[in-house]
Image: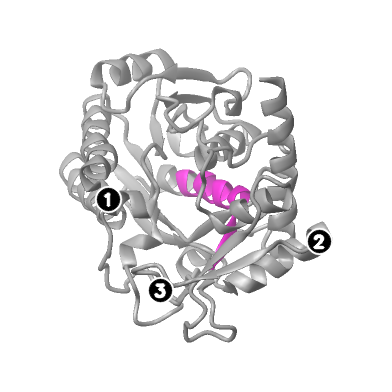
Amino acid sequence: MEAHGKVPVLVTGGAGYIGSHAVLALRDAGWPVAVIDNLSTGFAFAVPEGVTLYRGDIADQQLLGRIFAEQGIKAIMHFAGSVVVPESVENPLKYYDNNTVKSRALIEAAVAGGVDHFIFSSTAATYGVPNVSPVTEDSPKEPINPYGWSKLMTERMLADAGAAHGFNFCALRYFNVAGADPQARTGQSTAGATHLIKVACEAATGQRDHVAVFGTDFNTPDGTGVRDYIHVSDLADAHVLALEALLERPDRSLTMNCGYGQGFSVLEVLDAVDRVTNMTVARRMQPRRAGDPGHLVSDPARIRGTLAWEPKYADLDMIVTHALQWERRLSELRGKA
């Protein structure tokens, strides 16, 4: 019975930050895996030995059909896409093409190829600036940027296509993903990243001379923005459990927040970096960025009630430690390149 077997999985964007961790989580749990990535922001070195990497575009339906046939693909984990919010405001059509139009092509190929299970990398940006925090899955979906809209549109396409064609899906709405594989096998490698913990670790390792703090007048205990940081390896484990849930109940689709339900301010995160490194990262106070909510924390009740998900790394100092460990490893990899 397929529900209890480990079916072959195609990971789109599997050479990128979150995708490469999902590949490791699948591999570690014994699932057959293949990756498609155009390597525009991903890195071939992030794909483990023994995992087939197809270099190509997720909108290439001919290539997808060949991959499905060669690998016997029964499920897709879809991470490929563009993720920089300010860039989505400056270049919305890139985001609607890369995140929405190409996702439509991928869904169409999945329907044509009989791939019945689809896990989608969505985002808390679908909620926009929520009036209430913690945020539940039923909170209003009012994105304030093209990035959030591009992801919400894909959720809608999955719901409609799933109803019409009989496949099931899980949309996982991430909060602030951070950290790296505890064994330093992969991590966040993209140059010019905007994630706070990545930026702070670059500053701590001498790659930046300061960290910008955007907004000090929010209605929060220390005036800086509060976010729910989730360790990328815990997030990857949630994807594997979500896949198992789809296989066990093919009649059911899921939409779930991915976060710990606990928030830390920008200054608390920087204090954690100072603690872990035993040094002081320079901070430069800047005005708020347009559209940044003061407080964005998940309500994780649904994912905890639906999946047997027990986070292993829900500790801010541990997230920072693993991110820092990867930053040092990345310097070694770049030195060898």
Q: Which of 169 and 89 lies nearest the eye of the viewer?
A: 89
Tell which tag, 3 or 2, sits nearer the viewer: 2
The crowding category of the residue bearing disc 2, from other C-alpha atoms within 10 Å (few below 14, some 14 to 19, many at least 20), is few
**What stretch of residues is rendered in magenta?**
228-243
Residue on which the image places disc 2: 279
Label 1 or label 2, whichever comes before in sequence order: 1
Alpha carbon of mark 1 to alpha carbon of mark 2: how far? 36 Å
Judged left or right of residue 17, residue 73 is left
Label 1 – label 3 distance at C-alpha: 19 Å
Residue carrying label 3: 293
- Where residue 86 appears, x then y in whole percent? 35, 54
Q: Quadrant of residue 11?
A: top left
Q: Main secondary structure of the magenta part?
A: helix
Q: Residue at x 70, y 56 (%)?
A: 320
Residue 170, percent from left and from top: 37, 50
Are dots 3 and 2 in contact, CB under 8 Å? Answer: no
Q: Is residue 287 magenta?
A: no
Whether residue 223 is visible, yes or no, is: yes
Q: Secondary structure at mark 3?
A: loop
- Label 1: which residue? 90
Above or below 309: residue 336 = above
Q: Amino acid at mark 2?
A: Met
Label 1 SS: helix
Disc 1 packing (10 Å; few <14; some 14–19; many ≥20): few
